[in-house]
Image (spheres, rainbow, N blue to C red):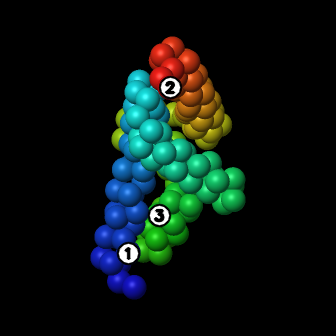
């Protein structure tokens, strides 16, 4: 593969990664603020895929893929501590964050999502019980 092809492919993986993170964060917020069942299912799918892939690959597979592609044409490239967010937060903004902090943020997102899910279920049951029964 040519250097240009590797660069474009790595940039594509990078963009997919940014979109995935944005979807995860936005779906977490919308899940907490609304009780739309379709959004809940989308959020659950995104969150499940994220947690399962992190567990299986012991890290993000998109990070591993981007790093592998970039190192094909730039042997000195290395994602800091194997973390996409740690590397780019440091590179772009000079912010040093530990990989443990990123894992903790994912755990917080998971916990907020769980609370949001159960809260919406409680609201649904409460509404059903409050409705007058016909028949």
Rounded to the nearest angstrom, the CA distance separating label 1 from label 3 is 10 Å
Q: Earlier in the sequence, mark 3 or mark 2?
A: 3
Q: Which residue is mark 3?
A: 66
Horizontal relation, residue 121 to residue 9: left or right: right
Secondary structure under the numbered disc 2 in the rendered image: loop
Residue 59, x across and y down, in percent: 63, 53
Residue 100, visible in the rendered structure: yes
Q: Earlier in the sequence, mark 1 or mark 2?
A: 1
The answer to which of 71 and 53 lies nearer the viewer is 53
Residue 26, x across and y down, in percent: 39, 36
Indicate which disc residue 30 carries: none
Horizontal relation, residue 67 to residue 103: left or right: left
The answer to which of 129 and 37 lies nearer the viewer is 129
Indicate which disc residue 135 carries: 2
Residue 91, visible in the rendered structure: no
**Residue at image x 38%, y 75%?**
6
Rounded to the nearest angstrom, the CA distance separating label 3 from label 2 is 60 Å
Residue 42, x across and y down, in percent: 45, 47
The answer to which of 106 and 12 lies nearer the viewer is 106
Horizontal relation, residue 11 to residue 99: left or right: left
């Amino acid at each position: 593969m040519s250097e240009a092809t590797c660069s474009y492919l790595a940039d594509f993986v990078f963009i997919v990664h940014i979109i995935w993170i944005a979807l995860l964060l936005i779906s977490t917020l919308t899940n907490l603020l609304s009780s739309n069942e379709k959004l809940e299912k989308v959020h659950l799918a995104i969150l499940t895929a994220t947690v399962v892939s992190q567990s299986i690959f012991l890290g993000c597979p998109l990070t591993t893929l981007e790093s592998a592609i970039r190192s094909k044409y730039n042997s000195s490239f290395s994602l800091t501590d194997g973390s996409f967010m740690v590397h780019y937060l440091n590179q772009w903004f000079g912010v040093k964050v530990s990989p443990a902090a990123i894992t903790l943020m994912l755990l917080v997102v998971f916990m907020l999502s769980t609370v949001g899910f159960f809260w919406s279920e409680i609201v649904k049951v409460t509404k059903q019980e409050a409705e007058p029964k016909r028949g």
